[in-house]
């Protein structure tokens, strides 16, 4: 029996669906910020990679890693690898941090504004 934080073995279709939902959630959140004039972040998606370019010329890069069934985040504070757990959350393989919480922290630090995904 797996714990809520244990990685889940996924089919390729399940992994793809989870990745697409994650990338859409990020894009939708950023679009909302742009509509409310909260912060000017440019997004660019190429396949499973989403680049967020912040006003101070820093970037956050979210990248799907299908062979490993992971989601990677590159930020100023470092690189992070996430696996989907049984609860449907992307959890960092080293620290146990949840993806959207860490993405919010990194975006807030780099964007110099309180941002929450």
Image: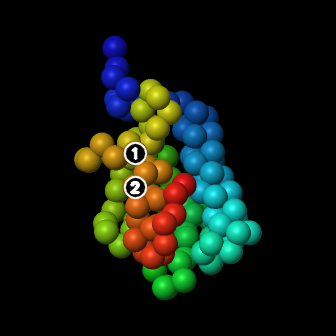
Visible residue check, residue 49:
yes
Q: Give percent across and percent down for residue 9.
A: 44, 28
User: Quarter holding the N terminus?
Assistant: top left
> Who's the residue at 25% across and 47% down the image?
94
Disc number for residue 98: 1
> Who's the residue at 53% across and 78% down the image?
54
Query: Coloured how?
Result: rainbow
Is the residue 23 above or below the residue 35 in the image? above
Left or right position of 28 against 56 = right
Q: Nearer the viewer, residue 95 or 84?
A: 95
Q: Give percent across and percent down for residue 106.
A: 41, 65
Is the residue 64 above or below the residue 53 in the image? above
User: Quarter holding the C terminus?
Assistant: bottom right
Q: Is mark 2 on a helix, strand or loop?
A: helix
Quarter of the view holding residue 47: bottom right
Instruction: Name the residue beneath numbered marker 2.
Output: 102
Visible residue check, residue 44:
no
Q: Give percent across and percent down for residue 101.
A: 43, 51
Disc number for residue 75: none
Q: Give percent across and percent down for residue 103.
A: 45, 58
């Amino acid at each position: 029996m797996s714990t809520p934080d244990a990685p889940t073995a996924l089919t390729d279709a399940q992994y793809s669906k989870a990745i697409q939902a994650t990338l859409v959630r990020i894009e939708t959140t950023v679009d909302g910020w742009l509509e409310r004039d909260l912060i000017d972040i440019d997004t660019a998606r190429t396949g499973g990679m989403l680049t967020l370019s912040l006003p101070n010329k820093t970037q956050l890069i979210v990248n799907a890693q299908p062979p490993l069934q992971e989601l990677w985040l590159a930020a100023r504070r470092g690189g992070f690898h996430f696996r989907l757990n049984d609860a449907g959350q992307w959890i960092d393989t080293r620290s146990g941090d949840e993806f959207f919480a860490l993405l919010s922290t990194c975006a807030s630090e780099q964007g110099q504004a309180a941002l929450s995904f």
